[in-house]
Structure formats: structure tokens, C-alpha cells
Image: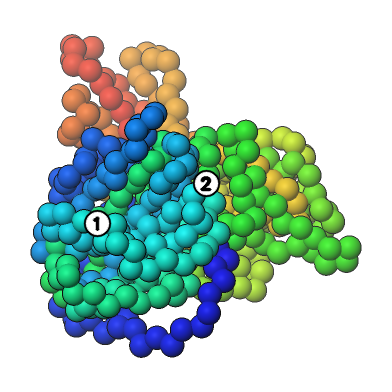
Amino acid sequence: MNIFLRCFALLSFALSLYSAAAGTWSDTFSQGILAAEWSEDTNAFWISNNALYGESANPVAESPLYILQVGNNWSNYVVSCSINLLSPNTRVCTKGALVLRRFGNEGYVFALHEPTQTIELYRLSNHEMLLSRAASIRYKQWYKVRAELQGDSLSLWVDDAFIGTVTDSRSPAGAVGIAVQDAEAVVFDDFSVTGTAIPNNDASPLSSWYDEFSGDFLAAQYHGDTADFSLTNKTLRGISISGPLTVGPLNTLEIGNNWSNFLISSSINLVRPQLRKCSKGALILRHSGDDGYVFALHEPTQTIELYRLSNHEMLFSKTFSIKYTNWYHIQAEVHSDTISLWMNQFFLGQVRDNRIPTGSAGVAVQDAEVLFDDLSIRVPNPGEPRAFQLWSSAPHDGKLQFALAQGAMVMSGQWYLELSHDLKTWQRITPFSPGNVSAFAQTAPSPADARPHYYRAALVEE
């Protein structure tokens, strides 16, 4: 967001100045229901698509300021949240806001006010304006707002641009939260409060992510080259523009920052090339700093590749027919130092590399226009069988024969056939023996045993 302001000299108390005893209360709204700590106008807010939505929309009368708050005596802290004014109501008082030090009718409202195109701080009780700055505020655009409160000093930022500092001692402590007014929908995400007296709520790290790109805007959790990606016709469109002689950059859209062992998949469609020298759609794995892995469909060379991001070291390459406007589904399993690759459910191969242990994950485009759909990232559950299919034959002479999907035997360790009658406890029956193409195991269930028989393949690693 471009905010045109005069320069202000500022001596800010930075987050790093808090003592080691500082706590953080945060909510990424990824649990599906409101956390129990939230209070006040809870009926005006709901969670959808990993974000919090708020509504305040009376058709004629002035819409109220609905508030969702947490805490009750918080004073000195840093609070931040991403806010997206999705849809107005009467467009008279349309705003999304942070609420600071609310106690009864008193407190402060730090608001993005679209009808007046201003960023404001005003008193909750009587609407006394304490600060107002002109700014370009647009619908369906994310803004990150941040307030730092220390004593009687309130300092404000939007998208890391300093807005100003207000000195006021009338509201020394209270609840903190978010607010919506005169809008059919305002979306909030990544709410966080950090301070010396703030309790930790032990927000769990991101363990899964799914996006079918059916909304109106990119989720606030995405980072990277967000300006080069947009939603169109319920898909994600990525673009990397090349010049007459220069190849366009590898533009990435990523989620999280500490994925280590995970499964990631997405459907990819290379719509059209630019120079057609490096035209690719790809998955990004464990991106940290300048390094990471790129699992790419490379149309000019008709290859599927896995390479290092930092130096383009080729770790895997396989010839594959890749055509423009066709959809392909690719999947990678990243486990410790092993990366396993699939295309359209067909196992491609494995790579061992331990130089990048963790990082962000997502999608990428270079020298092309590419569509993505059904992006899925998740951490496997403990004890979950690895992503290889188990095939079985029809009973013959009282025996059942099982085969692992091609590629399973390149894993380190030993595969076993296991049996369960209740899907809770499993009994190891026999190991799989290597075959010419895959691995096989067989068993002869007793005809007298009328219980259900469930089979699975389990890998015991070396």
C-alpha cells in the first residue's frame, strides 16, 4: 500500500526490547471454530477458509461497531493483524479495525476507514479523533496493521509504514481485539499480541494447508511474490514475464516457514510460455533463504526435474511428455533426507539430500503463465503408512497375494504386510519379498475366522 506521509522521527520500543518473560497470544483462525478466549460480539464473527470473517450490515440504520476481544487487563504490548475490507454495506462508516485497551465503554479504535480514505485512531467512548492520516484503502486487498502500546504512548503502523504516535493516558489497560462496522464482510487473519504480561496460548504450528482457490482473494498467510499471483475462475494464476532477450524470474507463492517432513501436491497447467526457454510450473520444497528444492515441469526440455534453488544443481531429471493447456497432478513426499516424487499418481523416483532440513513450501512459475489448483500440504500422522499403494489379487486356493506400487522397494528399510480386525491394532504377518518390478507378499486367512480382515503395508526403516 502506498501511503504518502511526511517523515517523522521516532524512538520506538521494538519488540526485541521486551524481556525474555514476554508472552504471545495468537490466532491464525485455522481451527474451524472461534477459540474459547474470544468474547463480546461473537455472533458477528465466523471462521471460513482459514480466516476470520466479521459482518456489521444494517440495510437502513447505522451499522454498529461489532467487537471481538481477548484478555481483560492488558496494558503494554505489540498487537498486529492482517485486515481485508472485502465488501461494504452502505459505505458510510465501512471499516476494519483493531481495538486497544478496551474497558467498558472506554478504549481506542485503530481503523482503516474506506469511505474517507483515512487511517484513524479514535476514542471508543465519544469518537474523539486522536489521529487521522490520508491513505489509499481499497476493497479486497490485505493490509497489515500494527500498534505498539507502552505507558501513555500508542504508535501505529500499516504495512510496515509508520503512521504516527499518540500520547494519551485515559485508557491504561483493558481487552484487545478486532472490530468491523458497516460492512457485509471484513476478513481478519494472523492476529497476534506480544507483551510482558501477555499469556502464551501455545498456538500450534501449521500442520496442514489446503487451498482450492475458490475465494475472492489470496489468503493472508501466503508470502513470496504475491503480486505475480491472482485468483481466476476458481484457480490460481501465476505469471513470470520475460523480456525480449531475458528470461523471467522464478516467482514463488509460499506458505509457512518451517515445513520439514510433509506431503505436498497440486494440479498444474502450463497455459502459455513467454520466451519458452525456461517455461515451467513447479512445487517449492523447504525454501529457506536462497536455498530450497524446485520440483518442476519443464516444457522446453520435456523433463520433470528436481533441482537446488541456490545453484540450479540438478538432483533428478526424467523425460516426460509435457503439453501446454494440459493438467498434471504432481506430488512430493519430503521425509528427513529423502524426497520422493510422483506425477499423475505414477512414482517417478527418489532423491537423497540433507543440505536443506526445513523451510517454506508452495508453488512457482517461470517464463510462462501457469494455473494451479488443489494445493495440499500436510504433515503425516505418527505411524501413517508411507504414500505407496497396496494392490491385492482375488483369492486363489485360499490365498491372497499383495503387491506394493512400483518404487516402494527403493525405500530404505523393510516392508511388512499387517492385518487388523478393528483398524485399531495391527498384527505383522509377513515381509514383502522383492520382485522384478515390485514387491510381493501373500497370506492364507482362516476360513473359520468370520471377523473383518483389513490389510496394510508398513515400512520399518533401518
- Give the answer, above or below, for where 172 lies relative to 177: below
Residue at 33% across, 38% down: 63
C-beta proximity under 8 Å, tags 2 and 1: no
Residue at 57% across, 71% down: 4
Residue 111 is drawn in which quadrant?
Answer: bottom left
Instruction: State the CA–CA distance, disc 2 to disc 1.
Output: 30 Å
Which tag is nearer the camera, tag 2 or tag 1? 1
- Give the answer, above or below, for where 18 lies relative to 312: below
- Give the answer, above or below, for where 271 lies relative to 450: below
Q: Position of residue 170 (x, y in %)?
A: 17, 70
**Which kind of residue does numbered mark 2 sit on?**
Lys
Residue at 13% across, 58% down: 103
**Which kind of residue does numbered mark 1 sit on?**
Asn
Residue 140 circle label: 2
Label 2 Cα crowd, 10 Å radius (few <14 / some 14-19 / many 20+)? some
- Name the residue nearer the viewer: 374 or 34: 34
Q: Secondary structure at mark 1?
A: loop
In the rendered image, the quadrant that contains the C terminus is bottom left
In the rendered image, the quadrant that contains the N terminus is bottom right
Residue 126 circle label: 1
- Name the residue nearer the viewer: 383 or 268: 268
- Dot 2 or dot 1: first in sequence order is 1
